[in-house]
Amino acid sequence: DTVYLNGQYLPADQAKVSVFDRGFLFGDSVYEVIPFYQGIGFRLAEHLQRLEHSLRALRIEMNQDWTPILTRLVELNGGGNVSVYLQVTRGSAGKRVHVIEPDIVPTVFACCQSIRDIYQEGIDKVVGIKVIVTADLRWHRCDIKSTCLLPNILVLQQAKESGAQEAILQRDGALTEGASCNFFIVEQGVIYTPPIGTEILSGTTRALILELADQHGIPRQEAEIDYQRLIHADEVWISSSTRAIVPVLQVDDYVVGDGQKGPLWQRMFEIFTRYQHQ
Ligand code: PDD
């Protein structure tokens, strides 16, 4: 495996980061996960815009042309279908101090992991999942794609221990998003998803689903969704770059709809597949 670290392409076991790196010590860092299909970045511009948003929020100043860096990395890893993990930390001041010292040089790390092209594999290969609903213990800047993922990891483990594959998070009575995805419900042919704000990550897949719904005349709305609406919805979906759009067939002990992959999910998956292949 070849990884990218601070301007160099290296074998993974030769890439070294300082123990004083603020990403390691404080989680003072942000990231992106970007799918590449057949070597080409999918919604790359949107991912890079969100990265800029995260970096601005941390006041990390960078002037990088990311596209050639990432494209080269994917090439060096044999192209194909991969997700690129890109992390930017504030860097190291050579000691542990909370306050941000001036003139710290950010650490940039990127690597690839192979992913399935679920759109290529086809709709029948998609397996519906079970989710649990649990408290959203995260901070109030979930719009920043920060690597401080401890709350996300703990709820995912909780989901796993309950025989589920995801956790939908609940804050002040409203559902926000999944541990590593956004979510949607369908009620009487209308798609609903929680609105963008500081309580959720603005998902690139989420945005594309809304865009495609508009293009195809499928009614959709951004609205607060509570637990009752979730368990009584006709369909529930989750979305992320690495998992695409996945139907949720069970929420806690409740079966969603008739327990099968729903018709609107199927339609959206097909629309998405066509978009991805064009
Ligand atoms: N996670 N919400 C959270 C908390 C996420 O971590 C993610 C993605 C999303 C979906 O965003 P997008 O559609 O742009 O992938 C929503 C990535 C895949 C990860 O952490 O691996």
Image (cartoon, rainbow, N blue to C red):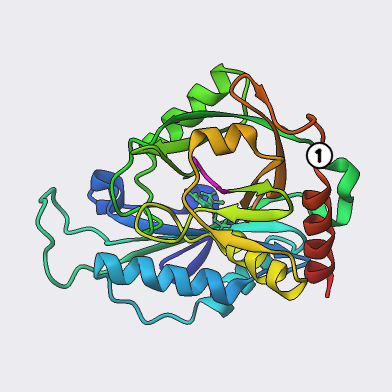
The number of callouts visible is 1
Residue that appears at 63% across and 71% down: 43
Magenta residues?
A: 178-183
Residue that appears at 30% across and 72% down: 56
Residue 165 lies in quadrant: top right
Residue 269, magenta (yes or no): no
Quadrant of the image for the C terminus?
bottom right
Is 132 displayed left or right of 75 in the figure? left
Judging depth in this view, the residue of 275 and 100 nearest the camera is 275
- Measuring from the top left, give residue 150's x and y in whole percent: 37, 36
Asked whether residue 86 appears in the rendered view, the answer is no
Residue that appears at 63% across and 65% down: 210
- What's the residue type where badge 1 is placed? Lys
Q: Residues within 10 Å of mark 1 (few under 14, many from 20)?
A: many
Asked whether residue 82 appears in the rendered view, the answer is yes
- Whether the residue carrying mark 1 lies under 8 Å from ligand 1 is answered with no
Residue 180, magenta (yes or no): yes
Is 75 displayed left or right of 67 in the figure? right
Q: 165 above or below 147?
A: above
Determine whether the residue tagged by mark 1 lies in a helix, strand or loop. loop
Judging depth in this view, the residue of 196 and 192 nearest the camera is 192
- Measuring from the top left, give residue 234's x and y in whole percent: 71, 40
Residue that appears at 79% across and 54% down: 117
Judging depth in this view, the residue of 62 and 56 nearest the camera is 56
- Measuring from the top left, give residue 244's x and y in whole percent: 70, 52
Residue tagged 1: 261
Judging depth in this view, the residue of 194 and 270 nearest the camera is 194
